[in-house]
Image (cartoon, rainbow, N blue to C red):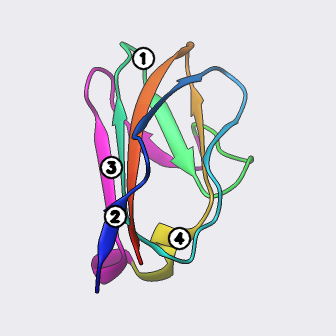
């Protein structure tokens, strides 16, 4: 199978309300998130993401890597983030082509 990176990894400003990072993509094989801010963030598959509903992403480099091999369909879901205080998150995806 051939693969490709998303045309460009992205950095997104995430605030205290839910921000969509990636839309659903059934061709996604892997997605990487890294918190570049000094504040905690949370990731989830819809806009209901919160401190009590989501994957914890620690400050200053906390990261999450999801792969189709290990995490199944979860990797292709849409991804949203929320932060305790506004900050920046880096993300990139790999797609099968």
User: Which residue position is annotated with label 2?
Assistant: 4
> Who comes first in sequence, dot 2 or dot 1?
2
Question: In terms of secondary structure, where does tag 2 sit?
Answer: strand
57 inside magenta stretch? yes
Q: Which mark is residue 64?
A: 3
Is 34 or 55 nearer to us in this picture?
A: 34
User: Which residue position is annotated with label 4?
Assistant: 76
- 88 is higher (above) or lower (below) than 27: above
- 96 is higher (above) or lower (below) than 83: below
Q: Nearer the viewer, mark 3 or mark 1?
A: 3
- Find the distance from the CA under tag 2 to the CA under tag 1: 31 Å
- The magenta-colored residue range is 52-71
Q: Nearer the viewer, mark 2 or mark 1?
A: 2
Q: Which mark is residue 39?
A: 1
Residue pictured at 74% horizontal, 48% vertical: 48
Question: How many marks do you count on the picture?
Answer: 4
């Amino acid at each position: 199978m051939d693969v490709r990176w998303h045309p460009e990894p992205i950095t997104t400003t995430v605030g205290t309300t839910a921000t969509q990072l990636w839309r659903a993509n059934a061709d996604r094989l892997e997605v990487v998130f890294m918190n570049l801010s000094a504040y905690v963030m949370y990731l989830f598959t819809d806009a209901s993401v919160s401190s009590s509903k989501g994957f914890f992403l620690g400050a200053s480099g906390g990261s999450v890597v999801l792969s189709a091999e290990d995490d199944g369909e979860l990797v292709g879901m849409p991804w949203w983030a929320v932060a305790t205080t506004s900050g920046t998150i880096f993300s990139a995806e790999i797609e099968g082509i």
